[in-house]
Image (cartoon, rainbow, N blue to C red):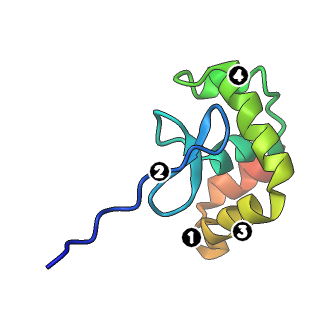
Amino acid sequence: MTLATPKQPTTITRYVTRKSTGEPIIIGTNTSVRAIVGLWRLGTSPEEIPNCLPHLTLAQVFDALSFYQDNQAEINEYIDRNRVPEHLIHPAVKAAIQNL
């Protein structure tokens, strides 16, 4: 009997690999490319993202954003799949987002 072995991560770029689920993450972390893109979409500059995620380097952030530029449909799908349903968002959070 042969046991199934877990899917091994695949390195995609210098700093981006895939989790066993297939989602792109930063090598050596559990930080998804989608999380970095989310901050960037909220207006956080790439240079500021390591202040929000201090375990990342600027090179990792730029590599993640570069990966996103080449794979927008895939990353946007991960973003959509992980979106919090509107009815679960606290009113204070909704108000803060509207003021951005």
Say what amino acid the circle numbered 4 marks: Ala
The residue type indicated by label 1 comes to: Leu
In the rendered image, which residue does mark 4 sit on? 59
The residue beneath circle 1 is: 88
Q: Do the residues labelled 3 and 1 touch (CB within 8 Å)?
A: no
Residue at x 71% of width, y 38% of height: 64
Q: Which residue shows up at 66% across the image and 28% down it?
A: 60
Name the spot of residue 81 as percent of width and height, x first: 63, 71
Residue at image x 79%, y 32%?
A: 44
Q: Where is residue 89 in the image (x, y as percent from the top left)?
A: 60, 64
> How much space separates mark 4 and mark 1, taking CA atoms?
35 Å
Calculate the distance from the C-alpha at mark 4 to the C-alpha at mark 3: 24 Å
Q: Name the residue under label 2.
A: 9
Give the mark nearer the N terminus: 3 vs 1. Answer: 3
Q: What residue is disc 3 on?
A: 77
Q: Earlier in the sequence, mark 4 or mark 1?
A: 4
Tell which of 57 and 54 is nearer to you. 57
Q: Quadrant of residue 77?
A: bottom right
* Mark 3 surroundings within 10 Å by alpha-carbon count, few (fewer than 14), some (14 through 19), many (20 or more): few
Left or right: residue 17 compared with residue 70: left
Q: Which of marks 4 and 3 is nearer the N terminus?
A: 4
Label whose residue precedes the other's in the sequence (2 or 4): 2
Mark 4: few/some/many CA within 10 Å (<14, 14-19, 20+): some
How far apart, in angstroms, are the residues tagged by discs 3 and 1? 20 Å
How far apart marks 1 and 2 lie (CA) works out to 33 Å
Residue 73 in the image: above or below residue 52? below
Q: Callout 2, which amino acid?
A: Pro
Residue drawn at x 68%, y 62% as measured from the top left: 79
In this rendering, is residue 24 above or below 56? below
